[in-house]
Image: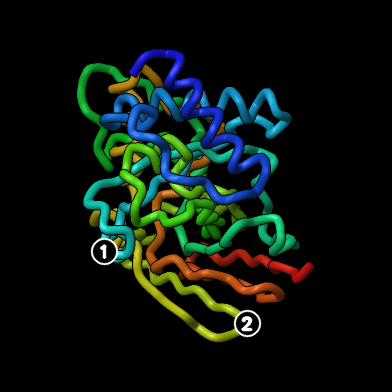
Amino acid sequence: MDSRNLTRAALQLARGRLRRERIELLPEELRPRDEAQAYAMQEEVHAILVQSNWGRVAGHKIGCTTAVMQRFLNIPNPCAGGVFDRTVFEQHAALRHADYVRVGVECEIAVRLGADLKPEGSEFTRENVAPAVQACMAAIEIVDDRYDDYKRFDTPTLIADDFFDAGCVLGAPVSDWRRLDLQALNGSTRIDGNEVGRGKGADVMGHPFAALAWLANSMAARGKHLKQGEFVLLGSVVETKWVEPGQQVAIHIDGLGGASALFAAG
């Protein structure tokens, strides 16, 4: 894809987020052909949003790291996106349902990095990324189905648009996470007090840090790296739940606590 079409496509994707309107399927000549083009287009989308006072990319998300989400979206491999600082909330968020096209929530384990993860010749593994983790957190990922029919969209186009990203609510950081068996932690989602789904840490690629290693390797292949102070949402242990106006969402992960969000009507 030439640079002109790359920019045209990125503008169309960014416009949907800025205007809170549904994105139509891109013309064939504007669709990224593979994941390499998808991540290049994602960078263009980020640049447009930054220039539009959207803030800066403060963290990262990984989608489709669990079998439940791969089945839900019919996508067999993880996908990464950026999270902008103006869409990040701490512990609780009071939001307007009308600020989204079709808002949904996911229950996730997140990490905050205390050191850079720069490639040093060998691949990242769940073991060698662990020393860089400063804290673990329970988190709500906020997603927005801003597509006229996401099932018609190819995976590279969804990646270019940050894979449904619309923000997150980060729970309180847990710095002594080493005392926990992250694989065994149970997570649950409640809407208006009713449990609507649950899963466990092992659902995320066998171990949550396997997802972190995947992202570190993916970024290294693109000449980038994860940085100290950034956070990473490692993937949902519960299938996406779509939220109606006025509903209250709460997630909880054993040993890590929880987070909540109200999506007020109007």
Residue 27 place in picture, x, y as percent = 39, 35
Residue drawn 36% across and 30% down? 38
Q: What amino acid is at disc 1?
A: Arg
Name the foreground residue: 213 vs 76: 76
Q: Report which quarter residue 116 is drawn in.
A: top left
Q: Is 190 placed left or right of 87 in the picture?
A: left
Q: Tell me the element at label 1.
A: helix
From the viewer's perspective, is residue 197 above or below residue 111? Answer: below
From the viewer's perspective, is residue 91 above or below residue 59? Answer: below
Q: What amino acid is at disc 2?
A: Asp
Residue 266 place in picture, x, y as percent = 79, 67
Q: Report which quarter residue 131 is drawn in.
A: top left
Tell me the colour scheme of the image.
rainbow
Residue 222 place in picture, x, y as percent = 33, 21
Label placed on residue 192: 2
* Residue receiving disc 1: 71
Query: Does residue 176 appear in the picture of this structure?
Result: no
